[in-house]
Image (tube, helix red, strand yellow):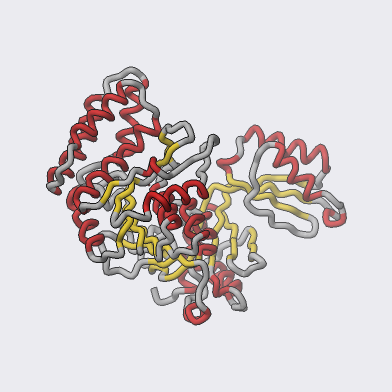
Amino acid sequence: MKVLKFGGTSMADAHSVSHVFDIIKKSAENRFIVVSAPGKSLKYTQKVTDSFSECCALAREGRDFSAKFKEIADRFLNIGKELGVKINLSSELKIIEHKLSRGADYDYVISRGEYLTAKILAALLKFEFIDAAEFIRFDTYGKLNLPLTAAVADKRLKTSRGAVIPGFYGVMPSGAIKTFSRGGSDITGAIVAYAVKAGVYENWTDVDGFYRCDPKIVPDCGIVEVITYDELRELSYMGAGVLHPEAVYPTMLGDIPIHLRNTFNPDAKGTMIVSSLFEADRINADTITGIAGKSGFLGVLIEKTMMNSEIGFVCGVLKIFEKYGVSIEHLPTGIDSLTVVIDKKNIESESLGHIILEITAVFSPDNIRIIDDLSLIAIAGQNMRGGQDSLYRICKGLSKENINIRFINKTTNDLSVIVGVEELQCERAIKAIYSEFYPDS
Ligand code: ASP
């Protein structure tokens, strides 16, 4: 049995919803469907979730939200009419409008896109509509309570022969609606897959799968056919993403493969995300699985002769960063030097100044300075394990392009290599590494 989740572009208008209908009707295995709210399309320049968010802001400021609300209402009424579904959308819309005028909670309002979309698709498929609010439970701190959710979901879903469930939200212990972070319908799909012990979780979007690297940088880069959860996490951390990062946990826990597929090209193979590769598949797989780069880092370089023999030096430096609540991304070290790499968006320049002053006062380094504008590039792949030449090929590619490696780090589990380069050289570096491993594409 399968769980299928369709993203915003798949639900954007009646035409794309009819593709979704065809995909679902192809197999009786397709029993649980999770949907996002309508996203952008050629005709609509705004996601319904953003339109609801605007309505909510207007209502809160005591301003007239009727024109914005009418835009949303018309969009849903059109989808319903074009698909010929017989449900009373107008009365659903009236309830939401009324609640909005009474100062409804933000999370309730922005979750209504998923709610209405699921109602429409359920009617079209003649499936049951099951509200996510019936089983997705958060705790009092707003954290998902997965064990409770799975237990309630199992009871509620197991008797259903076919159900459409709105993504993106659940309920607090108080009964109030609470949403996940943006893109959170992916998490709902993963939770449902875990709860019903699905054979596979199909995540349908508008791309053919997980790209080997950013297609804006290498337009012809291919699609990864199989990737492990670990590799995906390495690459997603560097910004490569088609899935919400929190969607991986429930599926990983249930050992359920995720199949990324394209609603507008259902014959494409897509990408399978699995817990581990069979040995035979591993041998046949490419040396690396993917490359992803992210800019906006800085390094604090600290140099001090005999640093290595000063017990507690590194720990003391890190404690100062901890004191200012700054999380550390990487820590390349030498005998007499240490660089603390941090994401610029996690630090204000004032705190950075304080940190440098404090390190200087406590440790009297010979030299301390900022290396600004760093990019990090992750190269991930199960097959680097035991492969002697992957580091050599990465360095060769970069050297051919005359790219200066600021630092390089190979994880001890041999799953990934992180290279630090100057921000201005990041795209060129990704291209260079890509063409070293995929010379023919
Ligand atoms: N509609 C929500 C968003 O735009 C949630 C989702 O699509 O997953 O973020």
Please state the horizontal and vertical placement of residue 387, each as a whole percent of the image: 59, 78
Which residue occupies the foreground of this view, 67 or 332?
67
Is residue 180 placed above or below 4 in the rendered structure?
Answer: above
Residue 268, percent across and down?
A: 30, 68
Residue drawn 35% across and 62% down? 2
Residue 111 in the figure: left or right of residue 292: left
Q: Is residue 91 above or below residue 359?
A: above
Quarter placement of the C terminus: bottom left
Counting from the top left corner in percent of width and height, residue 305 is at 84, 53
Determine the residue positioned at 67% across, 67% down.
412
Examine the rendered structure and indicate whether residue 78 appears above or below residue 241.
above
Asked if residue 424 lies left or right of residue 36, the reply is: right
Image quarter in which the N terminus is found: bottom left
Does residue 231 lie above or below 134 as drawn?
below
**Image point (39%, 40%), residue name:** 133
Residue 357 in percent (x, y) is at 75, 36
Q: Nearer the viewer, residue 6 or 382?
A: 6
Q: Is residue 242 visible?
A: no
Q: Work out whether residue 237 can be spotted.
A: yes
